Image (spheres, rainbow, N blue to C red):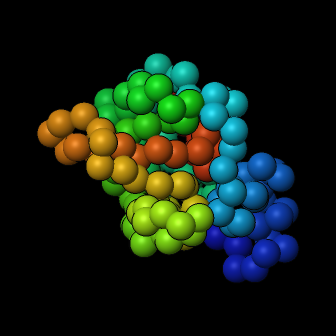
């Protein structure tokens, strides 16, 4: 069940997950538990369990966050904070903030979905 208010989200998520998913925060680079994960499986939204990324689309971008060349259950919107133009990525199902997508990823997509580990759960295959 997806919480409908802030109190519900605070009960469901730990402090770091709440900060990332609901307050649009970012975890420090190289600090997340899934950054160096190489197992096969599916990356799910930590907020609602929605399917977001496949391990076959994960790559090491050297940035310190899990990076993917393709996504499934996400939506995007323009982010103009900090005097930059970026594209913010959200979970399509619960609208949780995942972080950003950039146009410097590997071909054929050319995309780099740079995602906080705190926003993800991993289901091993």
Using residue 81 as the reference point, say whether residue 85 is left or right of it: left
Task: Point out the image quarter for the C terminus.
Answer: top left
Using residue 109 as the reference point, say whether residue 71 is left or right of it: right
Residue lying at the far front of the rendered structure: 83
Q: Is residue 108 above or below residue 90?
A: above
Percent x, y for residue 46?
A: 62, 51
Q: Is residue 53 above or below residue 34?
A: below
Percent x, y for residue 81?
A: 57, 69
Instruction: Using the image as rendered, state which of residue 37 and residue 19 is in the foreground.
Output: 19
Q: Tell me the quarter of the picture where residue 109 sits.
A: top left
Q: Tell me the quarter of the picture where residue 61 sits.
A: top left
Percent x, y for residue 15?
A: 83, 52
Q: How many tags in the picture?
A: 0
Residue at image coords 61%, 40%: 117
Using residue 31 as the reference point, say whether residue 68 is left or right of it: left
Percent x, y for residue 37?
A: 53, 23
Residue at image coords 36%, 50%: 102
Residue at image coords 54%, 35%: 65
Q: Is residue 93 visible?
A: no
Task: Point out the image quarter for the N terminus.
Answer: bottom right
Instruction: Using the image as rendered, state which of residue 78 and residue 59 is in the foreground.
Output: 78
Using residue 116 as the reference point, say whether residue 73 is left or right of it: left
Residue lying at the far bottom of the rendered structure: 4
Residue lying at the far left of the rendered structure: 108
Q: Is residue 36 visible?
A: yes
Residue at image coords 43%, 37%: 67
């Amino acid at each position: 069940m997806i919480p409908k208010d802030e109190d519900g989200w605070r009960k469901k998520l730990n402090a770091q997950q709440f900060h990332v998913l609901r307050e649009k925060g970012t975890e420090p680079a190289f600090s997340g538990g899934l950054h160096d994960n190489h197992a096969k499986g599916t990356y799910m939204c930590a907020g609602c369990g929605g399917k977001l990324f496949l391990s076959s689309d994960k790559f090491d971008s050297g940035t310190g966050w899990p990076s993917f060349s393709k996504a499934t259950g996400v939506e995007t919107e323009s982010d103009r904070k900090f005097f930059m133009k970026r594209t913010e990525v959200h979970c399509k199902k619960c609208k949780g903030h995942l972080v950003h997508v950039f146009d410097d990823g590997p071909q054929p997509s050319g995309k780099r979905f740079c995602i906080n580990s705190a926003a993800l759960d991993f289901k091993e295959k």
